[in-house]
Amino acid sequence: MASRGIDPTSVGPVALGRGDFLRAVDPVWKTAPAPYGPVWIATSNAVVQAAGHDPAASVWLFRIVIVAGVVMAAVGVASIARSCGVDRPYALAVGIANPLVILYLIGGYHNDALMMGLLCLGVAAAMKDKRILAVVLLTLATAVKLPAIAALLVVGWVWAGKGAPFTKRVASVAKVMVPAVAVLAVLSVATGIGIGWITALRSTGKVMDTFSFMTMLGYFGSDFVNLVGLSDNPEIAVAPVRFLGLLAGLGISYWLMARADRIGIPRAVGLGMCALVLLGPVMWPWYLPAGFALIAAAGLGRFRPSYMVVVVAISALVWPTSVNPVEFLTRYQRILSFSVIVLIALAAWGAQWLAARRHHRRVAGREARQALLHAGAELEPAPVAAR
């Protein structure tokens, strides 16, 4: 669309009229504007023109861009891990070379990979107190997809200094956000798009068949309301529950930001982004790798078992479109989706419990062996002095 002079953030792909690209669009998105920033729009424009407007060639060029984003993320994760005293090969293994990144970001060439690359490099620069570079990289990450703006807020908060009062924190955040917003505005104008890429985020909410816990909970609430005869609207409780989930995600993100001095910028940003996704109205697996990468770079600590379970389990949520669904189960899609989410949560809790139990057994066994050695030393007879 951008290569044809159409603003993809103001109208849907249907504006193309016809062609191979429009035929490939899911009907859900044909009239939906794109919630992507100027950096991604400009990148897409360049890729499609370089491919001569050939869809197949565009796919491979897009994948090169995505792989470059993953490589940038790997460099950033390694740098963050070094700053946090975390083993770099391990951080790269669990934060970058995991099934989510391989299957969805590289396999599906989602633009979240480019956002993740710029985000990780920006956080790495912030850890080294390279402030201008950090703000530039994080602003570019935000110009790919808006969720990266969370990192700008956190670094602005932390740069106020430990123990700084709230007013000084706000002023520090403003010093970061004002130039960032100015750059985003300039990039948008230069790319030929308006603020539609921000307001277009509302279009993602039209998707109801998602693995969002709050959406599933909302449907269960609607079913109950309909059952008692208070309403016949099948989605009456979905919007309020989604809104509460979004508020909860924002509250958790603020709580993490307020403790970023203690827990560190990578962990505050990573956990905050994951909270917003997991409690948000729409949840897809490719929304999570950026947050997971930052968490891995900051160190998993005792939560390594649950992290591994969640990453592997979420990787299996979405199957290729070539896999035909089981027809008689489609009517139970929401119940099954909710059950899968609950099972993943229980599996993560179980892995954490088993790991803690194993740790306690090791400690108890070590203490018992030390006690036996100590008791044996006390019972050993004293050596007889030579005459």
Image (spheres, rainbow, N blue to C red):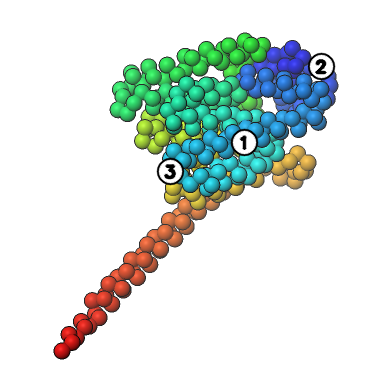
Give the secondary structure at mark 2.
loop
Q: Does residue 329 appear in this view?
A: yes
Q: Amino acid at mark 1?
A: Val
Q: Residue at x 46, y 56 (%)?
A: 355
Q: Neighbour class for label 3 at 10 Å: few (<14), some, many (≥20)? A: few
Would residue 151 appear left or right of 361 to someone viewing this image? right
Locate the N terminus and report the quarter of the image it occupies: top right
Would residue 18 appear left or right of 40 to someone viewing this image? right
Residue 70 - label: 1
Q: Amino acid at mark 2?
A: Gly
Precedes in sequence: disc 2 or disc 1? 2
Q: Nearer the viewer, mark 3 or mark 2?
A: 3
Measured from the top left, where is residue 228 in percent x and y?
Answer: 56, 34
| Residue that extends furthest to the front in the rendered view of this protein | 387
Measured from the top left, where is residue 118 in percent x and y?
Answer: 57, 28
Measured from the top left, where is residue 327 in percent x and y?
Answer: 76, 44
Give the secondary structure at mark 3.
loop
Depth check, front residue: 322 or 110: 110
Q: Neighbour class for label 1 at 10 Å: few (<14), some, many (≥20)? A: many
Depth check, front residue: 24 or 189: 189
| Residue that extends furthest to the right in the rendered view of this protein | 19
Reading the image, the residue beneath label 3 is 85
Precedes in sequence: disc 1 or disc 3? 1
Q: Does residue 142 appear in this view?
A: no
Can you tell which quarter of the image residue 159 is in? top left
Q: CA distance from mark 3 to mark 2?
A: 54 Å
Give the secondary structure at mark 1.
helix
Q: CA distance from mark 2 to mark 1?
A: 34 Å
Precedes in sequence: disc 3 or disc 2? 2
Q: Residue at x 61, y 26 (%)?
A: 205
Reading the image, the residue beneath label 2 is 17
